[in-house]
Image (cartoon, rainbow, N blue to C red):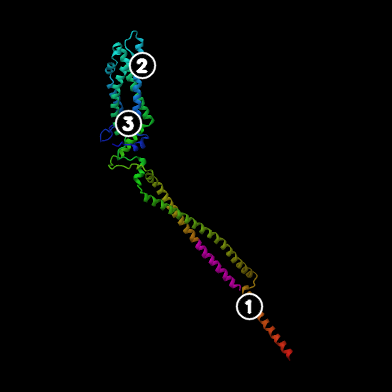
Amino acid sequence: MSVDPMAYEAQFFGFTPQTCMLRVYIAFQDYLFEMMLVVEGVILKKLDAIPGCQISPSQIRKCTEKFLLFMKDHFDKLFGRMEEVLLQLVLNIPKNVLLPEDRVHEQYPYSKEEFQALQEELQQLQQQCRAEAAAGEALRAELEEQKAVMGELEKILQCFNGLENICREHGTGNFKESFAFLTQNSKKLQDALKEVEEKSKKMEQRDENA
Amino acid sequence: GNGGDGPTGPAAPGRAQVFSTVVDTFLEKLVTAGSYQRFASCYRCFYKLQPQLTRSIYDQFISQLQSSIKEEIQEVKNEGNLEGLFNSLDKIVEEAKDRAEPAWRPSGIPEEDVRSALVPYLLKHRSYLRKVLREKEEENKKVAKSVLAGRDRIAELQQLIQARKQAWQ
């Protein structure tokens, strides 16, 4: 016959019911013995005070033992019955009862595999978060660069705008066209000059040969 | 006990009540067994000599035994907060009264049991991470839009500058 360790009850009460019962049994028994010794002591003292007493201490000891044996017998029987009732009705948790602190176990009966899957899912989510954070950093960095570049480009445009404004202010008409015309003309001049040089070289040679 | 409150009649005695009753019954029966007759019969020689003294010694013995036992019980109740525990256990049992199947019990293997205890925290963590991920994704979408718009703007500016350059050639 296996003994019920009453571990669940111990979880609730903070002690094992059987241990509690044992402690109480020992305490009660100690009191019983103690009281009996006191009784015997009192009787012996009283006997001492009686002159010419025929009763010996060993007789009294026999009386004490007789009474104690009788008491202990009843005490054990009665205590046994009390213990049985207490362990069955008071210091016990019925099989269908779940302690509130253990509700999670019925709510989330996760197997080893399910638990692992959940852990892996968490790892994956964490990685995704990190990836998104990194992407966010990169995007924001590019945004900053763009700001700088746009600034420079806009400055250049401003320069051009500035030039055109100056031209308009000083009434040089379409300065751009004139400038472009000049550039083209100077190119034409250069070509013309080159032609003239070559022609004069040829003329010189003819003169020399004549 | 809480007495008869409700149509179902008087409530069954709670654990605290049963405990008191059982202990009182034990004492009662013990005292009955250890009767004065029995005591006097064992200590016959002394009884013959001093019947009154025998009576008073017995009375003191019995009363002292009873109070020591009652004190011990009270100490056990106080130390373990038994009254409170009995009452909460009664409530817990009452709440489970419609349930027939045996309830979960610790498996004895801590790694197994701790899993279920951890699950609610993991689930909370998971919904937190999902939320954070969603928020980051939304934010990044917005920033990405700005970045694309910025690229377009830069291309536009570069084209404008090219055009101006050409006009000045």
Residue A79's x, y, as percent?
30, 27
In the displayed structure, A192 sits above or below B159; it is: below
Span colored in magenta:
B147-169
Q: Quadrant of the C terminus of chain B?
A: bottom right
Q: Which mark is residue A184?
A: 1
Q: Position of residue B80 (x, y in %)?
A: 38, 32
Q: Which residue is mark 2?
A: A41
Indicate whether A75 appears above or below A162.
above
Give whichever of A62, A121 is nearer the camera. Answer: A62
Image: A167 above or below B110: below
What's the residue type where badge 3 is placed? Answer: Ala
SS class, disc 1: helix
The residue sitting at the left extreme is B8
Along the line of sight, the residue nearer the viewer: A160 or A69: A69
Question: Which of the numbered marks, if any, corresponds to residue A94?
Answer: none
Q: Is residue B153 magenta?
A: yes
In the image, what residue type sits under mark 1? Gln
Of circles 1 and 3, the one toward us is 3
Q: Secondary structure at mark 2?
A: helix
Sequence order check, earlier mark of 1 and 2: 2
Point out which mark residue B16 bears.
3
Foreground of the two, A171 or A156 = A156
Q: Residue furthest top?
A: A52
Instruction: Give the quadrant of the N terminus of chain B.
Output: top left
Q: Magenta stretch containing residue A16, yes or no? A: no
Measure how far apart labels 1 and 2 are at the Cα level.
Answer: 143 Å
- Say what secondary structure mark 3 lies in: helix
The chief SS type of the magenta part is: helix
Front: mark 1 or 2: 2
Neighbour class for label 3 at 10 Å: few (<14), some, many (≥20)? Answer: some
Residue A168, image x, y percentages: 62, 70
> Which chain is indicated by disc 3?
B
